Image (tube, rainbow, N blue to C red):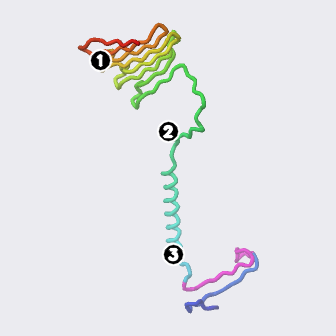
Amino acid sequence: MARSTDGHRMAISVSDGYTANNPLPCGTATVSNPELEVTPMKERTTQVLIAVVGLLFAANLISSARVPDAQSQDARNAPSVLRAQLIELVDEQGLTRAQFRVEPDGTAVFRMCDQQGNIRVKLGASEDGSGFVLLNDQTELGVHMLAKNTGTEVTLTEQGKEKRVIEP
């Protein structure tokens, strides 16, 4: 028996190898203090605390793990080319809000729609030129711009007012 610096009795044992009664590695010394012996109650409390810490750690890992979505994808993982005959953007209700396609006559057209599905913006390009249209709340022409091989013009219209055509 030895005494610690605070005067408590301690038992010291030294092991020089593995035995059935001493699974500690070679050259390991163990110090036991009878006053600090682990009782079944202390051992059970320790096990419960370790289990709680483990559960909290697992809950933290699960809550911080996120399913990757399109917004969190790294740009390096994005395809370098997207090829399609029709591209549609839809809102949360599944209504088409924008559409990009090539018409049967070969014209490339981009359309943007409001919440009711009415076209509000249209942009088109064909071999003879391009056009841009802005439609009002009645889906009537508000601004119409054309750039064709035959000439360029901008048409401005508003309900109850005279139509204005601007040409170079």
In the picture shown, does residue 87 fall above or below 16? Answer: above
Dot placed on the residue nearer the N-terminal end, 2 or 3: 3
Placement of the C terminus among the 4 image quadrants:
top left
Against 6, is 108 above or below? above
Taking the view exactly as shown, the residue that stands out farthest to the front is 168
Q: Position of residue 85 (x, y in %)?
A: 54, 19
Start-end of magenta stretch: 18-35
Residue 138, label in figure: 1
Q: Is residue 164 magenta?
A: no
Mark 2 and mark 1: span between their CA atoms?
35 Å
Q: Identify which residue is drawn at 64% across, 83% down.
A: 31
Residue occupied by mark 2 = 71
Judging depth in this view, the residue of 8 and 98 nearest the camera is 98
Using the image, tell me which numbered label, if any, was put on residue 42. 3
In this view, the residue in front, 72 or 59, is: 72
- Spot the residue most to the top: 150
Q: Residues within 10 Å of mark 2 (few under 14, many from 20)?
A: few
* Main SS of residues in magenta: loop
Q: Nearer the viewer, mark 1 or mark 3?
A: 1
* Drawn side of residue 98 relative to residue 77, left or right: left
* For discs 2 and 3, the disc positioned in front in the rendered view: 2
Residue 25 counted in the magenta span = yes
Q: Where is residue 23 in the image (x, y as percent from the top left)?
A: 70, 74
Q: Are circles 2 and 3 on residues that touch, CB within 8 Å?
A: no
- Disc 1 or 3, which lies upstream in sequence? 3
Q: How many other residues sit within 10 Å of disc 3, few (<14), some (14-19) or many (≥20)? A: few
Q: Residue at x 46, y 20 (%)?
A: 110
Q: Which of 32 and 100 is in front in this view?
A: 100
In the picture provided, is 110 more to the left or to the right than 38?
left
Could you classify mark 1 by the number of other residues whose Cα lies within 10 Å: few (under 14), some (14-19), or many (20 or more)? few
